[in-house]
């Protein structure tokens, strides 16, 4: 009976298929540990065996490497998830691992040279020094326990968790902008149809939110939902919880990124809230597998996902040392619009927001319309209706509240392509501004 990564092949296949994990981008062959291509028989390739191996390897990497581990990201990028995992399992030394990385097509195309590899640098994206690789191998190997990985996958299957892989629907392009610090895979509980990042705004802030902070958060989240945005946050007490609750109360979609496994709602006091997020068509996501416990480091790394999954990040209320300042930093480093809500100058709870405006060029925002503008929306037109783009304005201009019109008819009248019209209609449908009927689309509550 054949084995993969020291486990029975049929077990690996069952786990991956149970998690819904198959990596289309790697189904045609993944890199081998020596920089060449792994041998895959024609029969194996026809059933996506390489993709299954890669998916399982990515799941394993979420367990053996801490979130944001740039060295792990480099090794996986250079050798492929399966090749990198095999190298750890085969107990290759740092020198051999370095040789394989430097010989890989991925690394040779990155612009680095072999001379760079001898430097004593801590930058894993450019120079995989032997010392850095040796230290990484020492921290990965003790965590590569087959029984633990199988148990985490079994638990995930039992509670309905999906393994989300790069290239899957729901995988934000923003994650790839994190480079070697991007997640290897994500564990998702809830709807896999999470909104695209351009349709989502992150609302974050202090756990010990004041009445003012919670009030602003509730108003902002409800207003953003009315404009068709999903709300992204971290399910913590204070501003995060208020943002999720307001989105749910307004009939919107909200996504929570956790610092621990999605099978362990954290904080425990938000168990019911996290369940409501899933049941209302949202999702709860983590890059740590089931059974993982939150830690301070994982909270800080989780924040980069919140920023990457959103068109803009807004800090509603934050003290000088609030973790939401960390989220703002990630948004800024990704080049995403950053907003901050001002508060009383005498309030320590708003000192972090004032600092973001003063020192980090955050945009001062005071309501949902201004927050939506960060993501490219115009505030209102003459009829006080919100729009996300000129394309949406053109489509609505040629729509009627009484006469249904097909996508083709709308495309011809607006001068847009059918694909562009379909995208606009999807966004407007999410916002409740249009409705599809038997003979086409109509405005809801619009002009005749």
Image (cartoon, grey):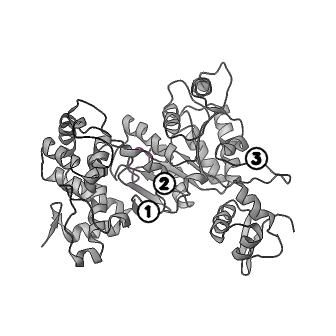
SS of the residue under disc 3: loop
Quarter occupied by residue 138: top left
Residue 234 at least partly seen: no
Asked if disc 2 and disc 1 are in contact, CB closer than 8 Å, the reply is no
Query: Is residue 350 magenta-colored?
Result: no
Q: Which residue is mark 2?
A: 172
Asked if disc 1 and disc 3 are in contact, CB closer than 8 Å, the reply is no
User: Magenta segment range?
Assistant: 258-263
Direction from residue 77 to residue 418 in the image, left or right = right
Residue at x-position 44% and y-position 62%: 168
Which label number is shown at residue 168? 1
Of callouts 3 and 2, which one flags the residue occurring earlier in the amino acid sequence?
2
SS of the residue under disc 1: loop
Instruction: Tally the marks.
Output: 3
Which label number is shown at residue 379? 3
**Vertically, is 42 above or below 52?**
below
Residue found at the very far bottom of the displayed protein:
438
Direction from residue 237 to residue 125 in the image, left or right = left
SS of the residue under disc 2: loop
Give the camera-side residue of 441 and 211: 441
């Amino acid at each position: 009976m054949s084995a993969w990564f020291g486990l029975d092949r049929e077990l690996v296949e069952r786990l991956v298929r149970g998690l819904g994990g198959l990596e289309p981008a790697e189904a045609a062959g993944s890199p081998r540990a020596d920089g060449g291509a792994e041998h895959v028989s024609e029969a194996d390739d026809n059933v996506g065996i390489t993709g299954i191996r890669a998916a399982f390897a990515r799941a394993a990497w979420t367990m053996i490497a801490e979130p944001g581990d740039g060295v792990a990201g480099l090794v996986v990028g250079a050798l492929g998830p399966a090749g990198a995992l095999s190298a750890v399992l085969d107990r290759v030394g740092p020198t051999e691992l370095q040789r394989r990385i430097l010989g890989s097509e991925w690394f040779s195309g990155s612009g680095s040279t072999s001379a760079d590899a001898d430097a004593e640098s801590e930058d894993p994206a450019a120079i995989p020094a032997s010392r850095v690789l040796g230290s990484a191998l020492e921290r990965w190997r003790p965590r590569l326990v087959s029984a633990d990985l199988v148990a985490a996958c079994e638990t995930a299957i039992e509670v309905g968790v999906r393994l989300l892989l790069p290239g899957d629907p729901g995988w934000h392009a923003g994650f790839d902008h994190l480079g070697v610090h991007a997640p290897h895979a994500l564990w998702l509980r809830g709807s896999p149809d999470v909104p695209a990042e351009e349709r989502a705004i992150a609302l974050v802030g202090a756990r010990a939110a004041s009445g003012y902070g919670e009030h602003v958060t509730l108003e902002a989240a409800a207003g953003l939902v009315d404009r068709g945005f999903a709300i992204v946050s971290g399910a913590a007490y204070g501003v995060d919880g208020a943002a999720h609750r307001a989105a749910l109360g307004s009939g919107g979609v909200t996504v929570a990124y956790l610092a621990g496994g999605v099978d362990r709602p954290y904080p425990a006091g938000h168990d019911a809230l996290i369940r409501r997020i899933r049941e209302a068509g949202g999702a709860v996501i983590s890059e740590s597998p089931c059974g993982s416990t939150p830690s301070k480091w994982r909270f800080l790394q989780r924040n980069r996902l919140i920023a990457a999954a959103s068109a803009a990040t807004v800090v509603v209320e934050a003290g000088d040392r609030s973790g939401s300042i960390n989220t703002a930093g990630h948004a800024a480093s990704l080049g995403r619009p950053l907003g901050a809500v001002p508060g009383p100058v005498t309030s320590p709870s708003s000192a972090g927001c004032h600092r973001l405006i003063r020192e980090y060029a955050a945009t001062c925002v005071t309501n949902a319309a201004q927050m939506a503008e960060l993501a490219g929306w115009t505030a209102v037109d003459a009829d006080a209706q919100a729009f996300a783009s000129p394309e949406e304005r053109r489509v609505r201009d040629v729509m009627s509240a009484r006469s249904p019109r097909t996508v083709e008819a709308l495309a011809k009248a607006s001068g847009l392509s059918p694909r562009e019209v379909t995208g606009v209609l999807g966004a407007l449908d999410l916002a409740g501004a249009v409705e599809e009927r038997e003979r086409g689309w109509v405005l809801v509550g619009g002009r005749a």
